[in-house]
Image (cartoon, grey):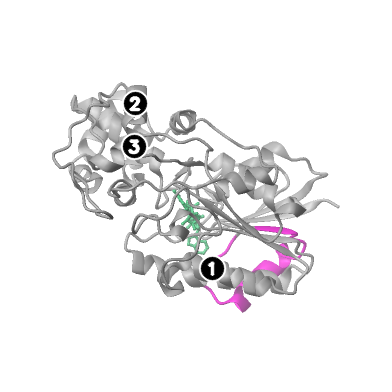
Amino acid sequence: MAKVALITGANGITGSAILEYLVKHSTEAEWSRIIITSRSPLALKTNDPRVEFIALDFSEPPELLAEKMRPVCTEVTHAYFSSYVHQDDFTELNNSNRSLFENFLDALLSVANGLQNCTLQTGGKYYNVHLRPVPWPAREDQPRLVPAAENFYYHQEDYLLEKQRGSSWTWNVIRPEAIIGYTVKPNGMNEALTLALYFIICKELGMEAKMPTNWNYWNGTDDISDARLIADLSIFASTHSQCANQAFNVTNGDHFSWRYLWPRLASYFGASASSEQGFDKRSLATGELFQETTFENWAKDKRQIWERICDRTGAHKAKSTFDAGTWAFQDWVFRRSWSATLSVNKARKLGWTGHLDSYDSFIDAFEKFKELGQIP
Ligand SMILES: NC(=O)c1ccc[n+]([C@@H]2O[C@H](COP(=O)([O-])OP(=O)(O)OC[C@H]3O[C@@H](n4cnc5c(N)ncnc54)[C@H](OP(=O)(O)O)[C@@H]3O)[C@@H](O)[C@H]2O)c1
């Protein structure tokens, strides 16, 4: 029987990628309806007649949500939760996100009687990679390092498992690294867009596009997750019985050193950067968070430069992109002085074959920003 998808966070970097994946790679016989939701009106355009949009705010109580969902969501068989409220402060981040998923799941379970799978997206922060050095590449079964109260992903995952216990539907959790992709509406974490703004402005100013990080992170090993692969694994895991009731990491499947990738990305925009970038401080304590400069400070006086570039190139629509730069998030990532990658062996062992060259992943995102008129 044809499946019916419900994708939350459709204006976001993950939700829009899952939508695009189903629109591109599935037929009506496989997926007869694709219901999508976001808090605000849909910013994306799609011509697929299977797509239906409903605006929902998951901070509302489940009973109220269920009332709004009932007219459209009763036939949902597969639900993909990628809603998220971004806060740069970790305590606020945890508080804001905890109840979103609970409200959503309670409402879903009261309306979708034929549910077969619910897939929740969390991320690398599950392993606390943002707080301190952790064993890496991180495996899905690694023990938790902090109490559940300090990490909203634990709370969300526990709630999913608790609600599923004894039910016929299955659960999956998908854990990506920094996501490379696009959104039509600004979001809280967009690495590729932030780097694109940085490189273009550095080029305009004729300044070296130094990576705002530290010696250890520059020379370490990293990985990223292309939104298209996240969508691919989400659909794979949720529709293959060998993956039922399991969590999966997702990355592009390669590893890189920023020292060598950074100058290649800069050169795509004609900006100057070198693998021999100098750092004043080379000896960092274990677990130290440190950046020689920060994106946040750097960006403070760059709006006018960006607007000048947009005016000169006739890309007037791109002026607002400056506000979509997620400078503080990028500082979170680049101030770490340790490497922390994720293992994707588990998904591979169960038959998932997705992989992408991370350089291509960035370049595809940059090209997409141009196509959308977000950058000149
Ligand atoms: N982005 C990354 O680099 C990254 C990396 C690793 C893990 N993750 C994780 O992936 C998950 C999804 O994040 P994302 O980056 O894909 O999200 P995102 O791009 O920030 O999109 C968030 C979505 O959630 C919706 N939303 C916000 N508040 C809502 C509310 N009260 N009710 C209903 N919907 C609401 C937004 O709706 P509107 O826009 O319509 O308001 C938007 O559609 C999160 O757990 C995140 O931590 C993200």
- Residue 16 lies, in percent from the top left, at 56, 46
Q: Earlier in the sequence, mark 1 or mark 3?
A: 1
The residue closer to the viewer here, 342 or 185, is: 342
Tag 2: residue type?
Gly
Tag 3: residue type?
Leu
Residue occupied by mark 2:
314
Q: For mark 3, give the secondary structure.
A: helix
The residue closer to the viewer here, 45 or 76, is: 76
- Asked if residue 187 lies left or right of residue 272, the reply is right
Task: Examine the image and state in which quarter residue 102 appears.
Answer: bottom right
- Residue 192 lies, in percent from the top left, at 40, 38
Q: Is residue 331 above or below residue 265?
A: below
Residue occupied by mark 1:
156
Please say if the residues under marks 1 and 3 sit with CB atoms less than 8 Å apart. Answer: no
Chain part drawn in magenta: 55-79
Residue 77 on the magenta segment: yes
- Asked if residue 202 lies left or right of residue 56, the reply is left
Q: Earlier in the sequence, mark 2 or mark 3?
A: 3
Query: What number is the disc on residue 195?
Result: 3
Q: For mark 2, give the secondary structure.
A: loop
Q: How many marks?
A: 3
How far apart are labels 1 and 2 at the CA level?
45 Å
